[in-house]
Amino acid sequence: MAMIRLENLSKHYKVLNRSEGLSGALKDLFSRDYRIVKAVSDLSLEVNAGEIVGFVGPNGAGKSTTIKMMTGVLKPTSGLLTVNGRIPTKNRAQNMQEIGVVFGQRTQLWWDLPVIESFKILRQIYRVDQSSYNENMNIFEELIDLKALYSTPVRYLSLGQRMLCDIVASFLHNPKVIFLDEPTIGLDISIKSRIREVIKTLNEHKQTTIILTTHDLSDIEALCKRIVIIDKGTTVYDGSIQKVSSMFGAHRTLKIQLPPAEYLALDQLATSVNGHFSQASAITMEQSEEGWIHFTINQDEVHLMDVLNYIGHHYPVHDIKIEEISIDKIVKNIYEGGLA
Amino acid sequence: MNMGRYLVIAKSSFMTRVARRSTFIFTFLGNLAYITVIYYLWMAVYEGNSMLNGMTFNQAFAYLALASSLFTMFQVYTEWFMSAHILNGDIITSFIKPLDYQFNKLFEAFGAVISNFITISIPTLLVIIFVFDTKIEVGLNLAFFVISLLMAMLISFFIDYMIGLCSFYTESIWGICTTKDVIVLFLSGAMVPISFFPEYLQTICAYLPFQAIYNIPLTIVTTPGLSLMDYANALAMQGMWVVILLLVSRLLHAVATRTITVNGG
């Protein structure tokens, strides 16, 4: 059964064209010069009950706008949207009763009050009966050791503790769908893995449909079978995470910094790397600021160590970093036919 | 409408206010300073007169001192919080709850008013009565005063809420807020009793909702010997403004929430 259905969903904003400078600011007071920004255009998607779907895309791709439409906060400009068989913007109160939302950058807990008060208040707001409240609180207790935090005001929690509390709180009223908007933003590795564990356990236990947005591909790999990648407001990939992982899992970004005296050698470095490795298509490079140059390497074809050795041998390397491929790069690669 | 949901909002807002207790001390001290100033100022105004514009010094002082006490009680910053939440995008956390935004804000304001009443208004009132030796009529007027206060709170809230809705459109309402504060304080009689106003200004005030926030409850409590008819008239006037402002704010609320877009995130 489709829990969430989007058909050719679009959302257009009207944005004032700002002029420059002080006189421009004054002019803008009376300006009627609008342009239309298409945050989401013709997005179609179907999510089944109990599924966890990873919803990713570069900044400004339209993820948040789509989430806000699915939660009923924003009204779509056109297209069809149902969540749990309802149109989210109609009969809002009833709809909110059946969904849960967590925003990584905000809290829905009561900032100045002890943690337990937020749960009690949410219980009353969502009219959760005492027995399911107790049952849920016991589950949460097992998962995150909630009791130790009961009397601490929310503002004294660490970001990780707060996020864990926010996530379990969104499950308190047993919603059918939960939207997690960047729940792991700004957290360290250990707390990230705890958060993934909590989400996974609660999803299995309650069969809640979960839409997860993140910038961290490892979140998706740990939690989802399916990934939807969007860019410029429309789907660029919708399918199994395995395919994406196998295509891009071997990709690493090697970042090399040269000492300030050698900045001019960057161009030379790029050309010589290009010339030295015959499978040049396996390496894409990009110069950055302060003497950094980024090589995105497909390790199935060229070993990162070889590239590193080669550069280390010929150039005075100041600093290096090795990172997993970012969502932005994946999107770029998909456009260039990476998944075709 | 399910009241339990909203009562817990009032309770949470009350608890939040009480958790920030240092605020009360400073607001209370500020009140004391203000009351001391108006005491000596109006003493000078009454120099050699026992009665001005139908008010004795004691009445005028009680009126203005209570006005400052009511002002801090009604000062719950609904419009400031709305505007701040619009700008930083936190407003979305209110919109994803199964609650009506306006009633949510109303009950938040209600909880805050009660916390202000207990922690600021009562101590200020005690100082007014015992330190400044002010006589306050005790009788039926107090019962009507309480009803009148409730309606005054609603009127004050609806005005704040409508100002807050402006931030859905303008993004910054600092100027609007401060202008509103001054207009409300002046035209409601909270700075100078309305009976001291020139004739034409009194007429204008009579047709505006602001005097229903301060002048009506304060007149009820400070004027001796009002008849039941006087009370009924005063309360009916307030009741009318409650209904009108409820309808108008509800309409604006519907329009504004339809056009809302959430920033950031």
Image (cartoon, grey):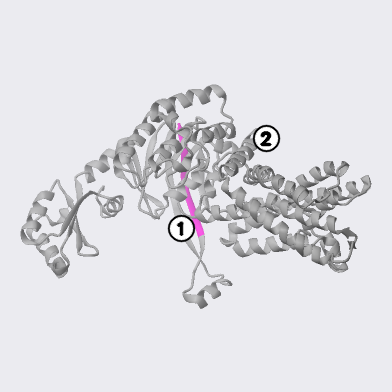
How far apart in space, not on screen, are marks 1 and 2 (Cα)?
40 Å
Of circles 1 and 2, which is in front? 2
* Quadrant of the image occupied by residue B201: bottom right
Residue at 72% x, 61% y is: B37
Element type at marker 1?
A: strand
Residue at 68% x, 58% y is: B33
Q: Amino acid at mark 2?
A: Met
Residue farthest to the bottom?
A23
Residue B151 on image: x %, y %: 77, 47
Mark 2, residue position: B3
* Label 1: few (<14), some (14–19) or many (≥20) C-alpha neighbours in 10 Å: some
Residue A9 on image: x %, y %: 47, 49
Q: Magenta region: which residues?
A: A1-13
Residue at 93% x, 47% y is: B229
Looking at the picture, tell me which residue is in the foreground, B139 or B201: B139
Residue at 59% x, 36% y is: A94
Please say whether residue B161 is one of the residues in the magenta stretch. no
Residue A240 seen in render: no
Residue A339 on image: x %, y %: 26, 47
The numbered disc on residue A112 is none
Would you say A290 lies left or right of B251 here? left
Mark 1, residue position: A38
Depicted A227 relative to depicted B211: above or below: above
* Label 2: few (<14), some (14–19) or many (≥20) C-alpha neighbours in 10 Å: few
Depicted B140 relative to depicted B201: above or below: above
Please say whether residue A4 is one of the residues in the magenta stretch. yes
- The overriding secondary structure of the stretch rendered in magenta is strand
